[in-house]
Image (cartoon, rainbow, N blue to C red):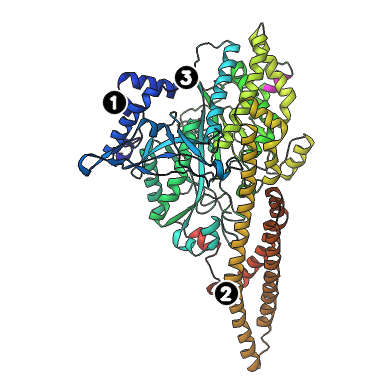
Amino acid sequence: MESIAEFGSMVFGEAEMKRRLPEETFEALRETIRRGRPLGRHIAGPLANAMKEWALEKGATHFTHWFQPLTGVTAEKHDSFIAPGPEGGAIAEFSGRELVMGEPDASSFPSGGLRATFEARGYTAWDPTSFAFIKDGTLCIPSVFCSYGGDALDKKMPLLRSVELIERETLRLLRAYGVKDVSRVTPTVGAEQEYFLVDAELCAKRRDLVLCGRTLFGAQPAKSQELDDHYYGAIEGRVQAFMRELDGELWKLGVYARTEHKEVAPGQYELAPFFCEANVATDHNQLTMELLRRIAPSHGFVCLLHEKPFAGLNGSGKHNNWSLMTDTGVNLLSPGKTPAQNTLFLLVLSAVIKAVDLHQDLIRLSIAGASNDLRLGRTEAPPAIVSVFIGEELTAILEAAALGNGYDGAGERMLESGIKAMPRVRMDNTDRNRTAPFAFTGNKFEFRMPGASHSIADANTVINTIAAEAFADFAEALEKAEDPDETAKKLIVGTVKAHGRILFGGNCYAESWKEEAARRGLVELKTTLDALPRYIAPENVALFTRHGIFSERELRSRYEVSLESYAKITRIEARTMLEMARREIIPACSKAQRHIAEAVNAKSAAGAAAASEKRRLLEADALLEAMDTRALALEKELARADAAPDSHAACVACRDGVIPAMAELREAADALEQITASSLWPFPVYEQLLMGAR
Ligand code: ADP
Ligand code: MG
């Protein structure tokens, strides 16, 4: 239990602040953290000093502003505390200014045209709502990252803006409905993280895993996940050791790492933390991804966070659980025992339903990316069509409301096990629907489309913004109402009528849902490239600028950065495939075929027919020929993408030319793998990779 005692030991949290700061300073800081009050200038100096003292005691020697540029991973630039001291010695220094602001330059991060080199200044600014922490002997100060002109260059600035927005609009809604005792509302988030572990030695032998984080070649193994014998299985050996170390390190950083289990695919696992405020949850998820990657090698693993490391097997996502919590301790998405009587809950629930229906495109956009395209709509992930699942009882309640009927539903239900000795347990009001992209799961919404490698900042920025907009609409109606409760009920009924098409309780993975969704007029943005232009659609620009989440310039920059990223990822993968095909697979297959040809010659000389060798040789030779021509074709498509006049054209060339050519090349290689002697195949195959991580 020693590690649990160490929980938060590397975080400069409230207890540490209280111990080290004058009472007045501490109170002022707490107002900022808890109530979002601006921080007085005079506080930075004493606070920086206290932080430095604490960090030095913990053995830290450096500090850094820790920020989240548009690459999706975190960035840091270390400065030591060292400054010249008396008599040629040194002292440790850390000023209030250094705490509050940094100018890392950092001009090579993607900015989508927001920073030309002549105006390359970039600033990091301290975000006091997320605690500083020590990682690897470095005091990390969670920060936002912006340009000289104040444009957001990161994922945190818009998220923080959206957190303030939803707090404002939820409070407004609550007041309008008559709830007066709440003074703070925060979005809460718990992000379940899926990942793969692959044996490090095997991984090092595959260029695709090393360079792209996923396999670009590989025939299906004889056995993978069909028997579900990995899912929730006993966690043994070095995986167990890895998870224990990971939990311990995350706890020190204040991350509530809680649930660990095996996922469906062999070598696939999941980590779920206890939820916390959206902003902190986003930081914690970034730390989780970083530590997953970093701790794996000391246990002989590589951790893959890619959305689809292995074709044909389950990919990895990140379930983003979202709700709203008041400072009076109420979860606004908690239905209570009798949801039918809980008008406020139904009001909040229907506002979210309305928001998702109105902004399906933004929900889809918030999780777009080349790697997630490989996962969405396959057997284990929701399709690129957004729908909402709320379960039978809530559907019945809303339908009854819409029809003007009373609901005389189940009320409290107990689990009937038929076993007397079992304790009686109350059942949830909703069952599960594991295929729904946006599912109400009892007291929160679980958004299942985000990819495993992505920051959850984008998704939560969108959810906060669109929910806030719907709350604002409702609040406006309630503010004018004479009887808020009556009006609230009308709003709920109206929402079900107007937006009920987004509700779906069936199997979202089925082909028939696609047709049904089209009939309902739901939006399907199949690929990332179909989704990205929604960044700059006039109605979305209007929405985000109206609420101060993104300026039009920021949206254009994000559009540009996302286009560039899509094209870059695709081209890196295509080049890696060409390398592997020409320098590894083709030479290995030539050699294998020479062996067969020699056997043909030897056997023929000895008077045998050598019919089976001849047949195998012809088959293999035809496939090798196909590989050669398909590699040439891929090269041509790649050249076309390289020559595209702008990033959108490059993406189109990638989607319509490069990606299909990659699939063709892979098909030939995978067929060859299945008829080539194992001993001659140039790198580890699926079976070895999947079964090797234990
Ligand atoms: P489930 O059984 O639905 O997966 P869990 O209780 O295991 O539910 O929770 C899954 C994730 O949802 C966890 O990370 C959990 O902390 C998070 N979660 C639970 N309640 C909330 C909430 N009110 N707001 C945000 N996340 C929540
Ligand atoms: Mg879950």
Residue of label 1? 19
In the rendered image, residue 164, in percent from the top left (x then y), is placed at: 54, 24
Q: Let me know if residue 177 appears in the view.
A: yes
How many marks are shown on the rendered structure? Answer: 3
The residues bearing labels 2 and 1 have C-alpha atoms spaced at a distance of 68 Å
- 450 to the left or right of 618: left
Residue 439 as seen in the image, left or right of residue 36: right
| Magenta run includes residue 400 | yes
Q: Nearer the viewer, residue 418 or 110?
A: 110
Rounded to the nearest angstrom, the CA distance separating label 3 from label 2 is 65 Å
Q: Which residue is mark 3?
A: 327
State the residue at coordinates (68%, 34%): 360
Three-letter amino acid code at the position of disc 2:
Ala
In the image, what residue type sits under mark 1? Arg
**Residue that lies at the very extreme toward the left in this rendered image:** 87
| Front of the two marks 3 and 2 | 3
Q: Residues within 10 Å of mark 1 (few under 14, many from 20)?
A: few
Q: Amino acid at mark 3?
A: Asp
The residue at which mark 2 appears reads as 677
Relative to 304, residue 141 above or below: above
Q: Alpha carbon of mark 3 to alpha carbon of mark 1: how far?
A: 24 Å
User: Residue 291, position in %: x, y?
Assistant: 42, 46
The residue stretch that appears in magenta: 398-403
Taking 455 as reference, is 418 above or below it?
Answer: above
Residue 600 position in % (x across, y down)? 64, 86
Camera-near label (3 vs 1) is 1
In the foreground, 290 or 671 = 290
**Which circle's residue, 2 or 1, is located before the other in the chain?**
1
